[in-house]
Amino acid sequence: MPDANLALISVAGTYAAAEIENALDNGLNAFVFSDNVPKEEEVRLKKKAHEKGLLVMGPDCGTGLIGGIPLAFTNVIRPGNISIVGASGTGIQEVSTIIDRLGGGVTHAIGTGGRDLSDEVGAITMKDTLLALAEHDPTEVIVVISKPPAKEVRDEVVTLLHGIDKPVVAVFLGENPTAHEGEVYFAHTLEETAHLAVALSQGKSIEAEIPKPQVEKDAKLEGKVIKGLYSGGTLANEGGMLISEALDLGGVIKEEGYVLRAHGHEILDLGDDLYTQGRPHPMIDPEIRVQKIKETAQEDSTGIILLDVVLGYGAADMAETLAPVIEEVLAEATKATRSLHIVGTIVGTKNDPQDFDTAKKALEKAGMHVTDSNAQAVDYSLQLLGKHITANAKTQKAYQGEKIELPAANENIIAFLNQNQKSSISALLISMNRSKNSVVDPFNLIGNQLLVAM
């Protein structure tokens, strides 16, 4: 396919490295939905891509937006002057949908795969993308998102950010920053990231207050705990981080799908590799989450169940599926005279296929308390227990560190990002039934630009 410039790879991890290599050898950027790819293969292939002036987005890359074209789990976002690069899938979705709802817009959202900022990988894809975005004229504000990174790699990325002549908003989950430095603005939550990006993109003050939920403590929840059942890994990490900070639980973990498991409080990432081997991702098939909601609601220790409901391309109509389950378990709790709250957020926009307003009405009618962000859902849950999110007040200070001269961005990557019309991006889809059971559904591209080879 001579017109293709991007390979979308959704095969079992066992076969993914060979397909990535084949794509690179044919001059194609690679968007890799596949997970369970050995880290040493990721390192080798990303180094090869760097040498060739190509991007490997992934492995385990769930979200991408290239010049307005959505790849995999992506929402319908208005175009604008913000671009995102993230070692995170639902983190990109949470930030981009809040940007949309605040009136801002996004040109590119480049997923790197969750391990890109590890010591071994060294942020190869993130660094190459940032250098190209620094020279991408339509991008006036850059957003960086990462699950907890390796410290040395994180510091290298931040040094690079200070060399970019554009405002940058950065959120490294697990950090509670105390200051913005120069033109790099550090956020505590994904919601704050979106608010900062929109303010900067519109030339407004970054001091505006972010709405916070207000709810009285529920005395009937004495001795009860919060249990999160997330489909999104980054949202689960953020939820675990915020609860751990507020309750002093010692930080997040990565253990059998759990990101938090302390003093009875649990946050479970149902999109973890443990749950997607041989079965669809929970955003595609809600069966495992329905099962977990019913089980968790029956546990005597459960006082609050935290959920994320992700809309957009590739995702099932989760609100339609979960609403009757929520109604059922709340009715059973009432009958048993137990206090049970179900709290969550909808990651989506009014233009998503599932429709944000319809989803919100269905979930609220079922009895779920719906908030405007994951951070607000966590804060609401903590307030029910008499606690709240703790965020540091930030000062603005000059950057005192090393300011580097940026290396030249690769011309091929710049050209790829400059193809910002839907008609100018063509993709080759490499997908097999032995993937995450997600063959074509996750790749709902707008229009007819997808060239499929099966």
Image: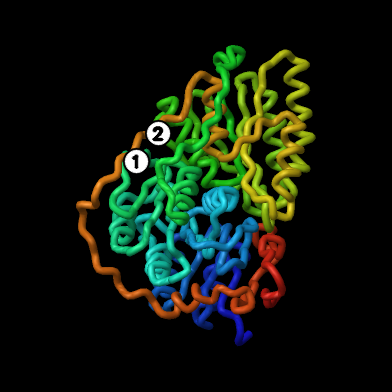
- Tell me what residue is drawn at x 29 percent, y 69 percent: 406
* Amino acid carrying mark 2 in the image: Ala
- Identify the residue position indicated by label 2 in the image: 391
How many numbered discs? 2
Residue at screen point 33% across, 58% down: 157
Left or right of residue 427: residue 387: left
Counting from the top left corner in percent of width and height, residue 245 is at: 42, 31
The answer to whether any part of residue 371 appears in the image is yes
Horizontal relation, residue 212 to residue 435: left or right: left
Residue at the farthest bottom position? 2
Query: Which residue is drawn at the image coordinates 49% and 36% (left, top)?
Result: 240
Residue bearing mark 1:
177
Residue 280 visible from this viewpoint: no
Residue 345, placed above or below residue 123? above
Label 1 Cα neighbours within 10 Å, binned few <14 / some 14-19 / many ≥20: some
* First in sequence: mark 2 vs mark 1: 1
Residue 77, which numbered label? none
Circle 2 — which element? loop
Q: Position of residue 151 (x, y in %)?
A: 31, 49
Q: Is residue 258 above or below residue 232?
A: above
